[in-house]
Image: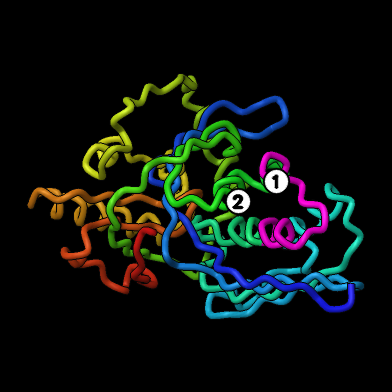
Amino acid sequence: MHAPYQRTLRAHGKINLLLRILAREEGGFHGIETVFQRIALHDLMHVSVIEKGRSLECDGPAMPVEGLGPPEHNLAWRAAEAYTAASGWDTGWHIEIEKNIPVGGGLGGGSADAAGVLRAMEAMSPKPVGLPALLELAGTLGADVPFFVCDTSFALAWSRGNRLLQLTALPQMAVTLVTFDAGVSTAAAYTAFANARHDSREGVGATWYPASMTASWESLSAFAVNDFERVVPLFHGGVAKVLPALRKEVSRIRAVGAPAIGLMSGSGASCFLLHPPELPTRLESDYGTVVRTTTT
Protein backbone atom coordinates (compact mmCIF):
# COMPACT_ATOMS: atom_id res chain seq x y z
CA MET A 1 0.00 0.00 0.00
CA HIS A 2 1.76 3.13 -1.19
CA ALA A 3 -0.78 5.73 -0.15
CA PRO A 4 -3.54 5.83 2.46
CA TYR A 5 -7.05 5.00 1.41
CA GLN A 6 -9.72 7.29 2.86
CA ARG A 7 -13.49 7.52 3.08
CA THR A 8 -15.47 10.53 4.28
CA LEU A 9 -19.05 9.92 5.32
CA ARG A 10 -21.93 11.19 7.39
CA ALA A 11 -23.01 9.11 10.35
CA HIS A 12 -26.66 10.03 10.90
CA GLY A 13 -28.41 9.74 14.24
CA LYS A 14 -31.77 8.06 14.88
CA ILE A 15 -34.84 8.22 17.04
CA ASN A 16 -36.90 5.28 18.28
CA LEU A 17 -40.58 5.64 17.42
CA LEU A 18 -41.34 2.44 19.31
CA LEU A 19 -39.16 0.67 21.87
CA ARG A 20 -40.34 -2.36 23.82
CA ILE A 21 -37.99 -4.31 26.08
CA LEU A 22 -38.44 -8.07 26.01
CA ALA A 23 -37.08 -10.83 28.25
CA ARG A 24 -33.49 -11.04 29.37
CA GLU A 25 -31.66 -13.75 27.44
CA GLU A 26 -29.29 -16.33 28.93
CA GLY A 27 -26.30 -14.22 27.92
CA GLY A 28 -27.63 -11.28 29.93
CA PHE A 29 -28.88 -9.22 26.98
CA HIS A 30 -32.47 -8.07 26.64
CA GLY A 31 -34.33 -8.56 23.42
CA ILE A 32 -36.09 -5.53 21.98
CA GLU A 33 -38.76 -4.53 19.49
CA THR A 34 -38.17 -1.12 17.96
CA VAL A 35 -38.93 1.13 15.03
CA PHE A 36 -35.88 3.13 13.94
CA GLN A 37 -36.14 6.45 12.12
CA ARG A 38 -32.99 8.10 10.78
CA ILE A 39 -32.62 11.85 11.30
CA ALA A 40 -30.63 14.51 9.48
CA LEU A 41 -28.41 15.33 12.49
CA HIS A 42 -25.09 13.57 11.90
CA ASP A 43 -21.47 13.15 12.89
CA LEU A 44 -18.86 13.71 10.16
CA MET A 45 -16.26 10.96 9.79
CA HIS A 46 -12.96 10.49 7.98
CA VAL A 47 -11.68 6.90 7.97
CA SER A 48 -8.17 6.31 6.59
CA VAL A 49 -6.43 2.98 6.12
CA ILE A 50 -2.65 3.28 6.62
CA GLU A 51 0.26 0.86 6.65
CA LYS A 52 1.09 1.13 10.36
CA GLY A 53 -0.39 2.56 13.52
CA ARG A 54 -3.88 2.97 14.89
CA SER A 55 -5.36 6.25 16.07
CA LEU A 56 -8.68 7.98 16.68
CA GLU A 57 -9.44 11.67 17.16
CA CYS A 58 -12.78 13.17 18.22
CA ASP A 59 -13.80 16.80 18.42
CA GLY A 60 -16.82 18.91 17.57
CA PRO A 61 -19.64 20.78 19.31
CA ALA A 62 -21.14 17.67 20.95
CA MET A 63 -17.93 16.56 22.64
CA PRO A 64 -18.33 16.28 26.44
CA VAL A 65 -16.05 18.50 28.51
CA GLU A 66 -14.50 15.41 30.07
CA GLY A 67 -13.87 13.83 26.68
CA LEU A 68 -14.72 10.29 25.62
CA GLY A 69 -12.09 8.33 27.50
CA PRO A 70 -9.37 6.11 26.03
CA PRO A 71 -9.62 5.75 22.23
CA GLU A 72 -9.59 1.97 22.42
CA HIS A 73 -12.85 2.08 24.40
CA ASN A 74 -14.59 4.03 21.64
CA LEU A 75 -17.14 2.04 19.65
CA ALA A 76 -15.64 3.24 16.36
CA TRP A 77 -12.22 1.88 17.40
CA ARG A 78 -13.81 -1.42 18.43
CA ALA A 79 -15.54 -1.59 15.05
CA ALA A 80 -12.22 -1.17 13.24
CA GLU A 81 -10.64 -3.89 15.40
CA ALA A 82 -13.58 -6.22 14.79
CA TYR A 83 -13.49 -5.70 11.04
CA THR A 84 -9.76 -6.20 10.58
CA ALA A 85 -9.83 -9.30 12.80
CA ALA A 86 -12.81 -10.83 10.99
CA SER A 87 -11.42 -10.10 7.52
CA GLY A 88 -7.83 -11.04 8.31
CA TRP A 89 -6.71 -7.62 7.10
CA ASP A 90 -3.47 -6.68 8.83
CA THR A 91 -3.59 -2.92 8.48
CA GLY A 92 -3.50 0.27 10.46
CA TRP A 93 -6.08 3.03 10.55
CA HIS A 94 -6.75 6.62 11.47
CA ILE A 95 -10.30 7.73 12.35
CA GLU A 96 -11.43 11.34 12.75
CA ILE A 97 -14.91 12.09 14.08
CA GLU A 98 -16.61 15.46 14.29
CA LYS A 99 -19.22 14.92 17.00
CA ASN A 100 -22.51 16.69 16.39
CA ILE A 101 -24.80 14.06 17.92
CA PRO A 102 -25.04 14.37 21.73
CA VAL A 103 -23.11 11.66 23.57
CA GLY A 104 -25.18 9.36 25.80
CA GLY A 105 -28.37 10.87 24.44
CA GLY A 106 -30.13 7.83 22.98
CA LEU A 107 -29.69 9.16 19.43
CA GLY A 108 -27.26 6.45 18.33
CA GLY A 109 -24.20 8.62 17.73
CA GLY A 110 -21.65 6.04 18.88
CA SER A 111 -23.44 3.27 17.01
CA ALA A 112 -23.64 5.37 13.85
CA ASP A 113 -19.90 6.04 14.07
CA ALA A 114 -19.18 2.33 14.50
CA ALA A 115 -21.35 1.48 11.51
CA GLY A 116 -19.59 4.19 9.50
CA VAL A 117 -16.25 2.56 10.24
CA LEU A 118 -17.56 -0.87 9.22
CA ARG A 119 -18.99 0.47 5.95
CA ALA A 120 -15.86 2.50 5.17
CA MET A 121 -13.49 -0.41 5.81
CA GLU A 122 -15.69 -2.77 3.82
CA ALA A 123 -15.49 -0.34 0.89
CA MET A 124 -11.68 -0.16 1.12
CA SER A 125 -10.94 -3.78 1.99
CA PRO A 126 -9.00 -5.91 -0.52
CA LYS A 127 -11.27 -8.79 0.53
CA PRO A 128 -14.74 -7.47 1.50
CA VAL A 129 -16.61 -9.74 3.91
CA GLY A 130 -20.08 -9.10 2.45
CA LEU A 131 -23.23 -7.66 4.01
CA PRO A 132 -24.32 -10.75 6.04
CA ALA A 133 -20.93 -10.92 7.81
CA LEU A 134 -20.92 -7.15 8.23
CA LEU A 135 -24.31 -7.28 9.95
CA GLU A 136 -23.09 -10.08 12.19
CA LEU A 137 -20.13 -7.94 13.24
CA ALA A 138 -22.46 -4.98 13.79
CA GLY A 139 -24.65 -7.03 16.09
CA THR A 140 -21.71 -7.75 18.39
CA LEU A 141 -21.14 -4.01 18.86
CA GLY A 142 -24.65 -2.89 19.84
CA ALA A 143 -28.36 -3.15 19.10
CA ASP A 144 -28.41 0.02 16.96
CA VAL A 145 -25.38 -0.76 14.80
CA PRO A 146 -27.00 -3.16 12.28
CA PHE A 147 -29.61 -0.51 11.41
CA PHE A 148 -26.90 2.01 10.58
CA VAL A 149 -24.90 -0.54 8.59
CA CYS A 150 -27.91 -1.16 6.35
CA ASP A 151 -27.96 2.56 5.52
CA THR A 152 -31.75 2.63 5.47
CA SER A 153 -33.90 5.41 6.89
CA PHE A 154 -36.85 3.54 8.41
CA ALA A 155 -36.90 0.00 9.78
CA LEU A 156 -38.52 -2.39 12.23
CA ALA A 157 -35.97 -4.31 14.33
CA TRP A 158 -36.20 -7.02 16.94
CA SER A 159 -34.14 -9.54 18.92
CA ARG A 160 -30.87 -7.67 19.64
CA GLY A 161 -31.52 -5.26 16.80
CA ASN A 162 -29.86 -7.64 14.36
CA ARG A 163 -33.15 -8.73 12.78
CA LEU A 164 -34.32 -5.95 10.52
CA LEU A 165 -37.21 -5.28 8.19
CA GLN A 166 -36.69 -2.27 5.96
CA LEU A 167 -39.85 -0.18 5.73
CA THR A 168 -41.14 2.19 3.08
CA ALA A 169 -40.11 5.68 4.12
CA LEU A 170 -42.89 8.02 5.25
CA PRO A 171 -43.16 11.71 4.28
CA GLN A 172 -40.51 13.93 5.84
CA MET A 173 -41.35 15.33 9.25
CA ALA A 174 -39.74 17.94 11.47
CA VAL A 175 -38.01 16.64 14.60
CA THR A 176 -37.48 18.93 17.58
CA LEU A 177 -34.91 17.42 19.94
CA VAL A 178 -34.39 18.35 23.57
CA THR A 179 -30.92 17.29 24.70
CA PHE A 180 -29.06 17.56 28.00
CA ASP A 181 -25.47 17.91 29.18
CA ALA A 182 -25.86 14.75 31.28
CA GLY A 183 -26.55 11.58 29.33
CA VAL A 184 -27.84 8.20 30.46
CA SER A 185 -25.82 5.00 30.67
CA THR A 186 -27.54 2.34 28.57
CA ALA A 187 -26.42 -0.36 31.01
CA ALA A 188 -27.84 1.61 33.96
CA ALA A 189 -31.15 2.11 32.15
CA TYR A 190 -31.49 -1.62 31.39
CA THR A 191 -30.63 -2.52 34.98
CA ALA A 192 -33.20 -0.08 36.36
CA PHE A 193 -35.86 -1.41 34.02
CA ALA A 194 -35.08 -5.04 34.86
CA ASN A 195 -35.27 -4.28 38.58
CA ALA A 196 -38.58 -2.45 38.18
CA ARG A 197 -40.03 -5.31 36.17
CA HIS A 198 -38.84 -7.83 38.79
CA ASP A 199 -40.29 -5.81 41.68
CA SER A 200 -43.66 -5.55 39.97
CA ARG A 201 -43.59 -9.25 38.97
CA GLU A 202 -44.58 -8.15 35.50
CA GLY A 203 -44.51 -10.80 32.80
CA VAL A 204 -43.00 -10.38 29.37
CA GLY A 205 -45.55 -11.13 26.69
CA ALA A 206 -45.47 -10.91 22.93
CA THR A 207 -47.01 -7.84 21.31
CA TRP A 208 -49.18 -7.98 18.22
CA TYR A 209 -48.71 -5.21 15.68
CA PRO A 210 -50.95 -4.82 12.63
CA ALA A 211 -49.29 -4.63 9.23
CA SER A 212 -50.72 -1.12 8.88
CA MET A 213 -48.81 0.18 11.92
CA THR A 214 -46.00 1.70 9.88
CA ALA A 215 -48.08 2.71 6.86
CA SER A 216 -48.57 6.31 8.01
CA TRP A 217 -47.55 8.70 10.77
CA GLU A 218 -51.14 8.62 12.03
CA SER A 219 -51.17 4.85 12.45
CA LEU A 220 -47.69 4.71 13.96
CA SER A 221 -48.51 7.38 16.53
CA ALA A 222 -51.12 5.05 18.06
CA PHE A 223 -48.37 2.54 18.95
CA ALA A 224 -45.54 4.91 19.86
CA VAL A 225 -44.09 4.04 23.27
CA ASN A 226 -40.71 3.75 24.96
CA ASP A 227 -40.45 1.31 27.88
CA PHE A 228 -37.43 3.16 29.27
CA GLU A 229 -39.67 6.12 30.12
CA ARG A 230 -40.87 4.09 33.09
CA VAL A 231 -37.51 4.36 34.85
CA VAL A 232 -35.23 7.02 33.34
CA PRO A 233 -37.26 10.00 34.67
CA LEU A 234 -36.65 8.63 38.19
CA PHE A 235 -32.94 9.42 37.95
CA HIS A 236 -32.74 12.09 35.24
CA GLY A 237 -34.44 15.35 36.18
CA GLY A 238 -34.28 16.80 32.68
CA VAL A 239 -36.23 13.90 31.19
CA ALA A 240 -38.75 14.05 34.05
CA LYS A 241 -39.32 17.74 33.31
CA VAL A 242 -39.57 17.64 29.53
CA LEU A 243 -41.79 14.58 29.00
CA PRO A 244 -44.98 16.28 30.30
CA ALA A 245 -44.24 19.26 28.02
CA LEU A 246 -43.92 16.88 25.07
CA ARG A 247 -47.26 15.28 25.91
CA LYS A 248 -48.92 18.71 25.85
CA GLU A 249 -47.41 19.51 22.47
CA VAL A 250 -48.55 16.17 21.06
CA SER A 251 -52.10 16.81 22.28
CA ARG A 252 -52.10 20.34 20.85
CA ILE A 253 -50.92 19.19 17.41
CA ARG A 254 -53.27 16.22 17.26
CA ALA A 255 -56.17 18.51 18.20
CA VAL A 256 -55.86 20.22 14.82
CA GLY A 257 -55.89 16.85 13.03
CA ALA A 258 -52.15 16.46 12.46
CA PRO A 259 -49.94 13.52 13.52
CA ALA A 260 -47.34 13.95 16.27
CA ILE A 261 -45.15 11.69 18.41
CA GLY A 262 -43.34 12.78 21.56
CA LEU A 263 -41.01 10.34 23.32
CA MET A 264 -37.62 9.82 24.87
CA SER A 265 -35.26 8.26 22.31
CA GLY A 266 -33.52 4.98 23.08
CA SER A 267 -32.37 4.71 26.68
CA GLY A 268 -32.26 8.52 26.91
CA ALA A 269 -31.64 11.18 27.80
CA SER A 270 -32.62 13.02 24.59
CA CYS A 271 -36.34 13.51 23.99
CA PHE A 272 -38.03 14.40 20.74
CA LEU A 273 -41.19 15.76 19.20
CA LEU A 274 -41.92 14.54 15.67
CA HIS A 275 -44.37 16.90 13.99
CA PRO A 276 -45.39 18.35 10.62
CA PRO A 277 -42.89 20.96 9.40
CA GLU A 278 -45.64 23.58 9.00
CA LEU A 279 -46.60 23.36 12.69
CA PRO A 280 -43.88 24.98 14.83
CA THR A 281 -43.49 23.77 18.39
CA ARG A 282 -43.68 25.70 21.63
CA LEU A 283 -40.89 23.87 23.38
CA GLU A 284 -38.57 26.28 25.15
CA SER A 285 -34.84 26.08 25.78
CA ASP A 286 -35.27 26.08 29.55
CA TYR A 287 -36.12 22.39 29.32
CA GLY A 288 -32.69 21.64 27.80
CA THR A 289 -30.88 22.36 24.55
CA VAL A 290 -33.36 22.51 21.66
CA VAL A 291 -32.10 21.16 18.34
CA ARG A 292 -34.15 21.35 15.13
CA THR A 293 -33.71 18.61 12.54
CA THR A 294 -35.80 16.41 10.24
CA THR A 295 -36.38 12.80 9.33
CA THR A 296 -34.47 11.57 6.28
The CA span between labels 1 and 2 is 8 Å
Quadrant in which residue 69 is drawn? bottom right
Badge 1 marks a residue whose secondary structure is helix
Residue 140 lies in magenta, yes or no? no
Q: Residue 249, image x and y in percent? A: 20, 56
Q: Residue at x 56, y 61 (%)?
A: 109
Identify the residue under disc 2.
149
Res. 208 mark: none
Q: Residue 86, image x and y in percent? A: 83, 47
Badge 2 marks a residue whose secondary structure is helix
| Disc 1 residue type (three-letter) | Leu
Identify the residue under disc 1.
134
Q: Is residue 38 visible?
A: yes
* In-image side of 278 versus 237 (left or right): left
Q: Residue 262, image x and y in percent? A: 30, 51
Q: Residue furthest left?
A: 256
| Disc 2 residue type (three-letter) | Val
Q: Which residues are magenta?
A: 117-134
Name the quarter where the C terminus is drawn.
Answer: bottom left
Q: Residue 138, image x and y in percent? A: 68, 46
Q: Residue at x 66, y 57 (%)?
A: 119
| Magenta portion: prevailing SS class | helix
Above or below, 205 against 49 in this view is above
